[in-house]
Image (spheres, rainbow, N blue to C red):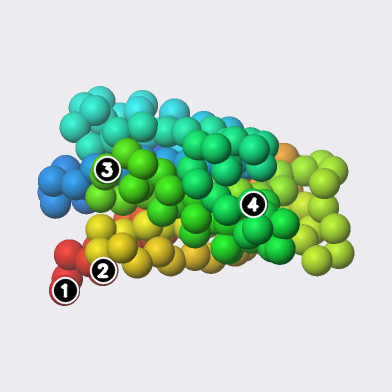
Amino acid sequence: MESNHTDQALEQAALAVASQLKACGRQLATAESCTGGWIAKVLTDVAGSSAWFDRGVVTYSNDAKAELLGVKEATLASYGAVSEEVAAQMADGVRLGSGVDYGLSTTGIAGPGGGSADKPVGTVCFGWALPDGIVETECHLFGGDREAVRRLSVICALRGLVDRINRSLTF
């Protein structure tokens, strides 16, 4: 039952992103780590997504984050891959690298291992690079197993994007 509910939430979030991006004629690219391409999958499940979704990049390793998205090695060394600083550089890197309007990133610890006292399992950081060059970030701590953390991360990332698109359309 819970999986059904979250599947509906995933679909609704993807449809909301599609509706907003189509309405404003903008495009999106994603840079994912802990979600492993799930955001891109959910978005491309929407028919006609090629009109507003440009690409998705999975950068699981630090080397991939640096090579493909321009994340600075000093940022990775200072803050770690799971940080708002890295999420910001991932989102901005995918937006600038693809030439689209919006960039969205996720980086986190889905578990079951890999957590620490400072960054426990379930810690996920998000980045949203906006058309005006501003990058916004958030970190959340999600409960549940690996599947739940990843699912909730996808929903949070997409809802966060919809909120930011809505905000930018009202100004």
The local secondary structure at tag 4 comes to helix
Give the residue displayed 50% in from the left and 46% down from the top. Answer: 70
Q: Amino acid at mark 1?
A: Phe
Q: Amino acid at mark 4?
A: Glu
Give the residue displayed 72% in from the left and 57% down from the top. Answer: 77
Residue designated by label 4: 73
Give the residue displayed 49% in from the left and 59% down from the top. Answer: 88
The local secondary structure at tag 2 comes to helix
Place of residue 145 in the rendered image (x, y in percent of width and height, measured from the top left): 75, 43
The local secondary structure at tag 1 comes to loop
Question: For the residues carrying marks 4 and 2, which lies nearer the camera in this image?
Answer: 4
Question: For the residues carrying marks 3 and 1, which lies nearer the camera in this image?
Answer: 3
Q: Earlier in the sequence, mark 3 or mark 1?
A: 3
Place of residue 123 in the rendered image (x, y in percent of width and height, measured from the top left): 69, 57
Residue designated by label 1: 171
Question: In front: 76, or 84?
Answer: 76
The local secondary structure at tag 3 comes to loop
